[in-house]
Image: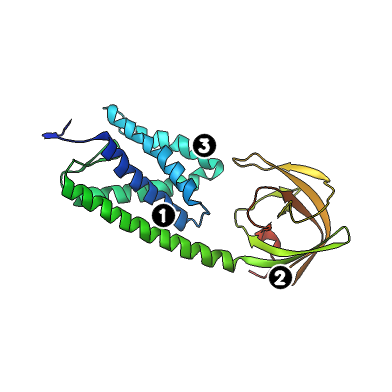
Amino acid sequence: MITRGEVMEVYVEVTFLTNFLIILSSLEMMGILLCKEMSYLQVLKESFLLSFSVLLLYIDSYSWMILIIWLVIFYLLYQKQIFLYYPVFLFIYFSILYFVSSFIYESFIYNGILIVPVSFSSFVLFIVGLLFVLLQIMFIVYLKRKVRINSYLYPVELFYAGKQYVFNGFLDSGNEVYYEGFPLILINEKIIDKYEIIDVVELNDLRSDFIGVIKVDTLAINNQLLENIYVGVIRGIKYDCLLNKSLMGGIL
């Protein structure tokens, strides 16, 4: 029971589910607005982690505590990009939160959490409406990602150690890896048969992986020829190559 001028019947399980769906919608919309590549499994995991804020129901004071907890979680998830993703997420989350609370009878917001009374009609209306919104978001994400991927794939020809390699490179706006001041194009280690690493660069993200640096003779990207260029060899990427926008010249 929760008292708010009157006694209301509220279950923690229902509260967790409703807020989980709101957070899930907020993360998906954040990904759309910021054009961030996020798998659906990743969104589910992060939504589940952020949903533990429901435990704030047991803290009567410090209504701003949810902001601190989410700030820490976003730092662990996004690190240097926290100042971009966190404000956008908060704006979307509280927009959805106040919108939902405005049309569900007797619902209210407590410590940044939506409290929904156990009423069959209002709860079903909320679930059906939110599921419909989620389906629309998933459809938009799918279409936008499909168009974006097809639009940002470029043919690449690489000449190294007397061999020619032909593959497609994905223009990744998030690839900001540099070696001695030069931007690096990242190539999947499965593409090149044998290569000689001249140096190693640590990848500064959550994976804490290492990139082997090689120097190739020539690299042709969409009819643009680059000679004696440094290239990073990396594992664990789903594309054959991650291009760097600093090396794309006037083809964009």
Residue placed at 26% from the left, 40% from the top?
14
Circle 3 is placed at which residue position? 76
Q: What residue did someone put label 2 on?
A: 222
Q: Earlier in the sequence, mark 3 or mark 1?
A: 1
Does residue 37 show up? Answer: yes
CB atoms of marks 3 and 1 within 8 Å = no
- Give the mark nearer the N terminus: 1 vs 2: 1
Q: Amino acid at mark 2?
A: Asn
**Amino acid of disc 3:** Leu
As drawn, is 188 to the left or to the right of 85?
A: right
Q: Residues within 10 Å of mark 1 (few under 14, many from 20)?
A: many
Q: Mark 3 near mark 2, Cβ–Cβ under 8 Å?
A: no
- Residue lying furthest left in this view? 6
Label 3: how many residues lie within 10 Å, few (<14), some (14-19) or many (20+)? few
Q: Position of residue 16 (x, y in %)?
A: 31, 38
Q: Give the labeled residue for mark 1.
A: 29
The kind of residue tagged 1 is Met
Can you say which quadrant of the picture contains the N terminus?
top left
Residue at figure coordinates x 20%, y 36% from the top left: 10
Q: Secondary structure beneath disc 1?
A: helix
